[in-house]
Amino acid sequence: MSNREIGAFEAKTHFSQLLKEVEKGVVIHVTRRGKPIAVLAPEGFYQEEASQKALKRIADRRKKISKRIHLTTEDILNFRDEGRK
């Protein structure tokens, strides 16, 4: 996914074209006097980004937990089988 920056006046003037670019996956950052004021992004873009961040946090936590808890394969199988009795 590519990014693009555009001034607010130009964005207003070329809004239809910008929407076509967004449909193709371009993320457009709108600025006013060089300061960011808005982002035009494809539907679901930020939801997907948030999901990816959440998955990374979960993976990082799992790594930390696995470093603290040392279970052997036998321990895990015993836990599994204990629930089946």
Image (cartoon, helix red, strand yellow):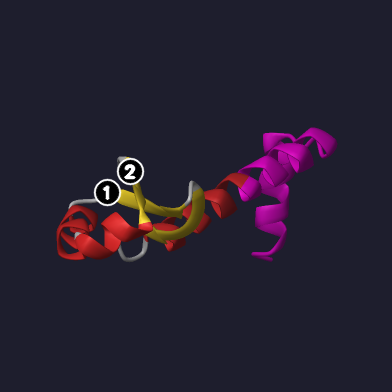
Question: Toward the viewer: 84 or 20?
Answer: 20
- Amino acid type of the residue tagged 1 in the rendering: Val
The one nearer the camera, 15 or 62, is: 15
Whether residue 41 appears in this view of the structure is no
**Earlier-in-chain disc, 2 versus 1:** 2
Q: What label sits on residue 60 in the rendered view?
A: none
- Which residue type carries mark 2? Arg
Magenta stretch mostly in which secondary structure?
helix
Please, what secondary structure does the residue beneath circle 1 have?
loop
- Would residue 21 be visible to someone looking at this image? yes
The crowd level at tag 1 (other Cα within 10 Å; few <14, some 14-19, many 20+) is: some
Task: Using a 10 Å C-alpha cutoff, classify the residue at mark 2 as few (fewer than 14 neighbours), some (14 to 19) or many (20 or more).
Answer: few
From mark 2 to mark 1, how far is it between C-alphas?
Answer: 7 Å
- Residue drawn at (27%, 55%) of the image: 10
Horizontal and vertical percent position of residue 66? 74, 38
Report the residue that reaches farthest toward the right.
Answer: 68
Figure quadrant of residue 17? bottom left
Query: Which structural element holds mark 2?
Result: strand
Q: Is residue 74 above or below residue 43?
A: above
In front: mark 2 or mark 1?
2
Q: Nearer the viewer, residue 85 or 67?
A: 67
Say which mark, if any, is on residue 26: 1
The quarter of the displayed image where residue 68 is located: top right
Which residue is pictured at 69% across the width and 66% down the height? 85
Q: Which residue is mark 2?
A: 4
Near-viewer residue (83 or 15): 15
Span of residues in magenta: 57-85
